[in-house]
Image (spheres, rainbow, N blue to C red):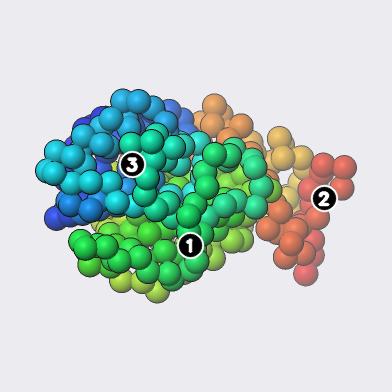
């Protein structure tokens, strides 16, 4: 696969390039990936963080072959995915496509789409055909974008390479996330182009593994609850996530809470005074 580098366009396939922002970290992995579709009228998927070096790299890649910025798409509006939209628009006013979140938690308040996309809506350009697939779960306004000619799916934070996605309630919803993964199995995907990390082969296998992994984690939550009778999130994380480093537990507790809320909604778990217990069916 093409090497992951910062502030430089890397060609992934005909008509598809990637520019990775220099914002690596615990939550962003190697950095946020921005995808460029087309050579002449270029669509940008996930502009990324509003970092001058990253914005300059996007514009340089577009203009290198005599292209021009034509459209901007955002998978969602977390601060590492959409804020560079504002700087790109100062360069050239173009159509912005995405969706607004139902809350303001960790959101890019400046993002204002010209078109709020809907599930299965198709956006055609001279060199691409992008299908918007609603994938709420990581956050309420999340969309993946399928380039229908190549089968590449720009996954944003729905699927990452190198780690599983953190689900942070109340904006994040574990039930919605698992359902959104299953929806992807209905589409003719050839590769996954994640918001963080390298291209992923065998999309159906990756998606099914993620579904199975979340359900196995959920089963482990119930197993530990039944063994303890009742427990707090702080107590549960030590056993439910015993397979990950303790340093990661503060983040793991967020997804654990999302699992517990899902189980509560399904009447398989209950809470009182911040202590959780399994419910016998």
Q: Residue 212, position in %: x, y?
A: 48, 60
Q: Is residue 159 left or right of residue 79?
A: left
The mark that comes first in sequence, 1 or 2, is 1
Q: Which residue is mark 1?
A: 117
Q: Residues within 10 Å of mark 3 (few under 14, many from 20)?
A: few
Q: Are marks 2 and 3 in contact (CB under 8 Å)?
A: no
For the residue carrying disc 2, how many other residues have a C-alpha within 10 Å: few (<14), some (14-19), or many (20+)? some
**Residue ranking furthest to the left:** 65
User: Label 2 belongs to which residue?
Assistant: 271
Instruction: Work out which quarter of the rendered image holds the C terminus and state it.
Output: bottom right
The quarter holding residue 3 reads top left
Left or right: residue 154 versus residue 9 is: right
Q: Is residue 131 left or right of residue 77?
A: left
Q: Which residue is mark 3?
A: 92
Q: Residue furthest right?
A: 273
Nearer the viewer's eye, disc 2 or disc 3? 3
Tag 2 secondary structure: strand
In front of the other: 23 or 237: 23
Q: CA distance from mark 1 to mark 3?
A: 21 Å
Instruction: Quarter of the image for the N terminus: give it.
Output: top left
CB atoms of marks 1 and 3 within 8 Å: no
């Amino acid at each position: 696969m093409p090497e992951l580098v910062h502030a430089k366009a890397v060609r992934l396939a005909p008509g598809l390039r990637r520019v990775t922002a220099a914002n690596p970290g615990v939550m962003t992995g190697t950095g946020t990936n921005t995808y460029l579709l087309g050579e002449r009228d270029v669509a940008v998927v996930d502009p990324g963080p509003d970092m001058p070096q990253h914005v300059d790299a996007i514009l340089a890649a577009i203009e290198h072959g005599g292209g021009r910025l034509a459209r901007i798409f955002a998978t969602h509006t977390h601060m590492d995915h959409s804020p560079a939209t504002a700087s790109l628009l100062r360069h050239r006013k173009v159509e912005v496509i995405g969706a607004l979140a139902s809350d303001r938690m960790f959101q890019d308040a400046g993002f204002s789409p010209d078109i709020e996309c809907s599930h299965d809506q198709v956006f055609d350009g001279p060199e691409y055909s992008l299908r918007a697939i609603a994938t709420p779960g990581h956050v309420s306004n999340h969309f993946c974008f399928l380039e229908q000619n190549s089968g590449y799916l720009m996954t944003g934070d729905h699927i990452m390479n190198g780690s599983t996605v953190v689900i942070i309630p109340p904006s994040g919803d574990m039930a919605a996330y698992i359902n959104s993964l299953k929806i992807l199995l209905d589409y003719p995907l050839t590769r996954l182009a994640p918001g963080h990390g390298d291209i992923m082969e065998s999309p159906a296998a990756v998606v099914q593994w993620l579904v199975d992994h979340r359900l196995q984690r959920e089963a482990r939550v119930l197993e530990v609850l039944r063994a303890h009778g009742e427990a707090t999130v702080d107590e549960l994380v030590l056993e439910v996530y015993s397979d990950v480093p303790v340093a990661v537990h503060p983040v793991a507790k967020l997804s654990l809470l999302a699992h517990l809320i899902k189980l509560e909604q399904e009447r398989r778990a209950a809470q009182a005074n911040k202590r959780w217990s399994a419910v016998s069916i």
